Structures are given as C-alpha cells and as structure tokens.
Amino acid sequence: MRLPLADGVERYRIPQAAALPRTARPARSRTVFAAAHVVADPAAEHRPGVPAVLDWDATLAFRHHLWSLGLGVADAMDTAQRGMGLDWAATRELIVRSGAEARAVGGRLACGAGTDQLTSPAPTLKEITAAYREQSEVVQEAGAQVVLMASRALAAAARGPEDYAAVYGELLAAVDRPVVLHWLGTPFDQALEGYWGSADLDLAAGHVLEIIHANADRIDGIKVSLLDADREIALRRALPAGVRLYTGDDFNYAELILGDAFGHSDALLGAFDPLAAHAAAALAALDRGDEDGYRAVLEPTVELSRHLFAAPTRHYKTGVVFLAHLAGHQEHFTMVGGAQSDRDTEHLARLFRLAAEAGALPDTDLAAARMRSFLASKGFDA
C-alpha cells in the first residue's frame, strides 16, 4: 500500500496484529472508563448547526464492545462530540438508551451533565446551576454516575473562584451518589480558559482543591485533562483520602495509571475508545502484579495516542471515529456535524500506520481495504 505522508509517499505493508489476552472482568486495581464515540446515521444530513441524528444500533453496540472487555463506559462526554455536534436532544436520548443497556448487562456507566441546553447568550449563575441540575437528574434517572462537565457558560459568567464554589456547592448538595468533577484544559477547548477562577493553573488547582475538600463525601474523583503529567501528579497527591484522580491525559496515561510509590491515577480516557482491548489486557496484567506485562501492552500505544490528540487537540474525535471504521465497529466514516473533515488525509494516513504498528486494527485485511477506499475517495491511488 502507498500512503501519502508529510515526508513523501511511503510504501507500507500492514503487519498482522498480535493477539491480545482477552478478559471480560473489570480491573480490580484501577477504576477505568473508556469515553465512547457516537455513530452518525449515514443517511441523515450532517453539517454544523444541523441536529444530530445517530445510528442507535451501532452506537449502542460499541458500548457493549467496551463493557465486554470489562471497561466502564463514559458517555455523553467530549469523545461523543458533546458541544461539538451532539446537541442536548440527542445527548438526552443517548444517556437514557445507554443507561438501559448498562442495566441489562451490569455495565458500569458514567455520563456527562453540563449546560449545553442553555440558549441565552449570557446566562446567569442561577440559570447555569439550573441547567446543570436538569442534566444531572437525567443522568441519575438513567442509573448512571454523574460527571459534572466543565461548562463554557460558567467559564464566561463566573467572576472568580467564589462563583465556582457556589455553583458546585449547590450541585453537589443535590446529587444522590458521589460524582466526578471535570477539568478540561484549553488544548481541548479554548472557551474553558480560566476555569475554577484563574488562568494560572497552580491557582486554579488550589481553588478546585478547596471545593473538593469541602465536599469530599460527595465526590468520587476529578477527571483531569491538562496534558501535563507533573501537574496531574501534584494534584493527585493533594486530594483528600478516598477521592480519585481520573487521568484524562492522552499523552501520558501509561505512566500515570501505573503510578509511583505515592499513588496512581485511575482513568477516564478518549484514547481507550480505539485502544479498549489494549487497556483491558494491560489492566489485567496490572491486577496480576505484572508491571512488565502492563508496560509491554500499553506503552507501544502512546505514540498512536499522541498523534491522535495532536494539535488542534479538539479534533481528536475525527481520528477516533476513523479508527472505529477501520477496525470494523462501524460501516462508514460519516460524523455528526460533518466532523470527518476536521483532519487532513496525511494525518489520517499516519494514524492508520501507527494504529497498525500498535496492533489496534484487529482485522488487518478489512482495515487495509477500508484505507484504500478512503484514499481513493480523496483522489489518491493507494
């Protein structure tokens, strides 16, 4: 096969993927969620501003794939194009449907609650709090754990850390089980600049720690996506006992989940959508106390993940869905909001090569055929 890469056309022979040890048991040593993508209905219109239409059978089948590997599912989050094509109407239905499927198989499910149903250009803190509560109730009624997603509306409206403390204090007082907080850095969403009350990340960490310490009995953990391992470790060590740090660092997850003498991170990762089988096998090795086996499975995936999440990081969903198509989880590469156009051909060609080398394409013949078809659609003879 010929691949169009930045340094020229490369002749490439896809290697056969090595079989990974298969387990269906949830990990004992770590709590891990794979943030799941959604599958668009290819017969519907998909462009910015058009209501999302999903292929429900394929979307829910992918969640069953994740549960079958023993992983938890984090749904209605960024990987599902939340706020980037997936509107609240479709999100609500996704939460309800995923909740029913999770109950049917005993799968662990966490779902994002945010404020993206707001229509006012400048909502008040009261309106923002009410929007959060409405969505939290939908998640709780579905039987899922609430993830209080970082809110663009709150980032715009808050005047300082005291506003974050007031909003989150009211929300945490109303939940029926411990929730996960969500700190999404600006590489993922520039509109979240200054979250927790300061653009200085050290000060912001201090502010969120105050909220966590004041409400520790209502917080299961905090999901941190700053792509800064040292900062994550420092925050992890400052958390009160019993509060988890869920890494959202798609650059450094292997070392953060493994941890050190002072502790480890659990995980809520978009990277574990295309790397679910690797995550499950690595966690099973960790449960056995086999750190070398853990590293052997997971570390070779890091280069792939770093390319998947390369700047502009917010477009990583395009690569996630492309890999799901190559791996046979969906029949097409159509995305909600037309987001399949958010990455160029060279980026996706390199993603294909890295996925093949990481063993993330279980049916190499199918993956090669679909890659050739994609390249032909772009006018390139593979």
Image (spheres, rainbow, N blue to C red):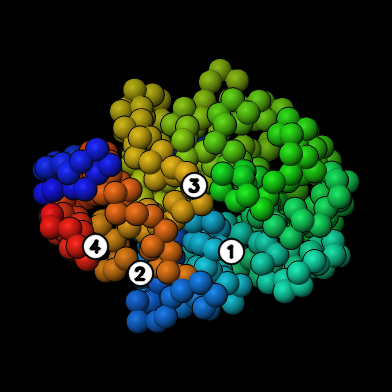
Q: Residue at x 68, y 72 (%)?
A: 117
Q: Position of residue 14 (x, y in %)?
A: 14, 44
Tag 1: amino acid: Gly
Give the distance between the C-alpha atoms of the residues marked 1 and 2, in whole angstroms: 18 Å
Mark positioned earlier in the residue sequence (1 or 2)? 1
Give the x, y percent position of residue 81. Answer: 51, 62
The residue under label 3 is which amino acid type? Thr
Judging by the rendered image, the residue that carries numbered circle 3 is 313
**Nearer the observer, disc 4 or disc 1?**
4
2 or 4: tag closer to the N-terminus: 2
Q: Is residue 355 left or right of residue 77?
A: left
Please name which of the two marks, 4 or 3, marks the residue nearer to the observer. Answer: 4
Q: Residue 36: give x, y in percent of width and height.
A: 45, 57
Left or right: 255 in relation to 341: right
Q: Is residue 143 above or below residue 243?
A: below
Quote the CA–CA distance across marks 3 and 1: 15 Å
